[in-house]
Amino acid sequence: FEVKTGVVTWSEELYHIYETDQYPVDFPHLKITQIYEADRDKYQREIVDAINLGIPFDVDLRIITQKGNIRDVQSQGCPLFDSSGALLRYVGTVTDISDRKQIEKSLETREAYLKLVMEIADAIAWERNLEIDQLTFTSSAYLQYPPLSFAEALNVCHPDDRDRIIQAHQTALAELGYFQIEHRVLATPPASG
């Protein structure tokens, strides 16, 4: 977007994202009807205001294409200035992130379902970050554990079950897999520190 002339140059991909072969914009403002209604305030607040202030922006929002389809896009823009500090133009990208947003929504739904199942079953799930040796727990309402190191997590387990847990971990790491094991835990979580 050239500030002085108002000329906007689109890539072929941008025409594809908007499902059009003609400019659907009158810059610096998209036709507001092309922004999904629930995202119009966000568009004004994060993109139009950034352009007016001459600052970069990076925002996810939904658009309505010329064919009436709704797409999630990531819009990024960066101002370019001349040597005197006057705003010359904005350069940016619009990326169709609809697939990513659909995957995120699916994961959120599955995560909520898993949490509900775990609450009903009074179960605990965890994830181990090997880089920092930390286990993060998704706990039942009755047993709340803070993030723990593997050694600290073993101390939460019943002493008679610890060797089986260590063996299951080692096998999963060697096979680059996962494991499921039943074991006993102490009712009182250890103090984090």
Image: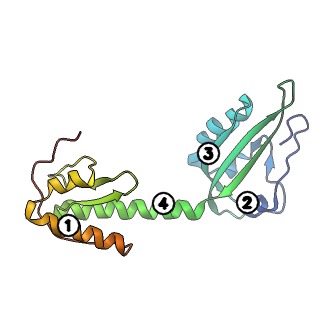
Name the image quarter holding the N terminus.
top right
* Drawn side of residue 4 relative to residue 130, left or right: right
Q: Pointer 1 and pointer 4: residues touching (CB < 8 Å)?
A: no
Is residue 53 placed above or below 25 in the rendered structure?
above
Q: CA distance from mark 3 to mark 4?
A: 16 Å
Q: CA distance from mark 1 to mark 4?
A: 32 Å
Q: CA distance from mark 2 to mark 4?
A: 22 Å
State the residue at coordinates (21%, 49%).
145
Q: Quadrant of residue 156?
A: bottom left
Is residue 17 placed above or below 34 in the rendered structure?
below
Tell me the kind of residue under disc 4. Answer: Glu
Is residue 167 placed above or below 187 in the rendered structure?
below
* First of labels 2, 4 by sequence position: 2
Is residue 122 placed above or below 34 in the rendered structure?
below
Q: Pointer 1 and pointer 2: residues touching (CB < 8 Å)?
A: no
Residue bearing the label numbered 1: 165
* First of labels 1, 2 by sequence position: 2
Residue bearing the label numbered 2: 18
Q: CA distance from mark 1 to mark 2?
A: 53 Å
